[in-house]
Image (spheres, rainbow, N blue to C red):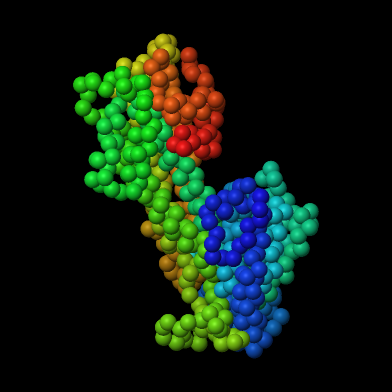
Amino acid sequence: MKALHINGNDLTLEAVREVAVERRPVLLDPDARTAVDRARAVVDALVANNQVSYAITTGVGKLSDVRIGGEQIREMQVNLVRSHAVGVGEPLSIAETRAMMLLRANSLSKGYSGVRAAIIDTLCEMLNRGVTPMVPSQGSVGASGDLAPLAHLALALIGEGECLDEQGGRIPSAEAMKRAQVKPLVLEAKEAVSLINGTQGMLGVGILALLAAETLVDSADVIGAMTLDALKGTDVAFDARIHQARPHAGQLKTAENLRRMLESSQIRESHRDCDRVQDAYSLRCMPQVHGAVRDTLAHCREVMETEVNSAVDNPLVFPGKDHVGTGAPARPEERSSGEGGGDILSGGNFHGEPVAFVLDFLAIALSALAGISERRLERLVNPALSEGLPPFLAPGAGLNSGFMMPQVTAAALVSENKVLAHPASVDSITTSGNKEDYVSMGMGAALKLKRIVENTRNAMAIEAMAAAQALDFLAPLKTSKRLQQAHAAIRAVCPTMDKDRVMYQDFARIADVIASGKVADALL
């Protein structure tokens, strides 16, 4: 793939996925290199003049009143990385860690962090040569950013700690760097705090979850349409006039998708003049529910796209000609002047609240997507609701149990989601000697969201398998051509059930098909 040139200003979420998953190479943009060098000159001048500036010539957090100078500055960089690498729990996946590395490099590329370009170049080299730090998933409260996860990333940068091999096994970072012919760095003033301060842990996990969720909501429209057709539901509820009267963008989109999915279905035409007036909410209200999920995803994407191209460490460096004074003069401890009139300002861009909120919102939305899927599944298998389909979609019901237990599994998944969807961001706990007294819990929100994405995909896979089975029972009547395409994608990995069999592998394969976008492709 063509190399991605990062500059801190125009990175897309799709490019994050390309680097994290598809191993697209990464380079620092030449213009960004100039901006990085200018900011670094401000830091170098401050250190040369022995001026006081937070985290450059002082300690950090509660220890910000301790002066650091001379050779201690370089020693402090190593100490900061080592002392903050305190994560526990299962490591983040290779893709999540690679996303983190790219996001950290991109943020530093904006030229407000005061690091040397060598820091960004080394992160790019590690990405390009497959060096993946081992980053424990737990230990961040989401302010001052994801300190522990980012410290584990920085630890590998200096040749310490552990990395993951291609199989997920652990090897010493020094060995991983040597194999890849990447030279570990000796960190200079401010570089440690610039590496460990930021929201890239929660953001990296969150972006991959958001992209997966966007595929899920498209797939939900397709699978929901399969279920509705199998239950001989009506498409009247998707009439464009209804949705133009309440024109939420997501609702309009899902209603349009459902109309297209059901167009020219023989099954629909076979009962067009029946006595049923309207369907249950889980069928009739798909535009309103799926559409609200779509609108939530759009909001989450907007916030994440802003965060991806933001400077989120502290303090930030503003070289002279870029600095525009917009407020009262800063106190001496908050502002330091460097070369060319540049300023180094202490602030709080590392705080994860904007990201934490949308991660929680996304968790709530996906819980609804899974919940309505399970209710449709119940209508497919429950003989009191399934419009003449065999009980539990079982050939020879009684001798065979069919989809009796898969509905129980789906119920367990959606109920677990209800617990996990409790917002992490409503919590806070005081850290760092009460200096960091209100935190976002954004990383906790991201880790919960990962589980909700998996649960939702699995619940939808069960509905998809059941909907395909139900459509088979309605032969020789055929569903629409678009839904036949989705049915074929499911049948490519999961044959019709003509008697009871072990199904858990079917669910896993269909979940993979959904994740790949092959079910959603019916919308194209």
In which quarter of the view is residue 7 placed? bottom right
Residue 174 pos. (x, y %): 76, 58
- Foreground pick, 288 / 162: 288
Left or right: where 251 falls relative to 273: right
Residue at 63%, 47% in the rendered image: 22
Residue that extends furthest to the bottom in the rendered view of this protein: 49
Q: Nearer the viewer, residue 274 or 144?
A: 274
Query: As drawn, is 397 to the left or to the right of 210?
Result: left
Q: Residue at x 28, y 39 (%)?
A: 240
> In the displayed structure, would residue 166 be above or below residue 97?
above
Q: Is residue 422 visible?
A: no
Residue at x-position 38% and y-position 34%:
260
Q: Residue at x 55, y 83 (%)?
A: 321
Q: Nearer the viewer, residue 63 or 501?
A: 501
Position of residue 367 measured from the top left corner of the image (x, y, whole percent): 39, 43
Q: Position of residue 149 (x, y in %)?
A: 58, 59
Relative to 5, say whether 49 is above or below.
below
Q: Classify 159 as above or below 324.
A: above
- Left or right: 253 with respect to 75? left
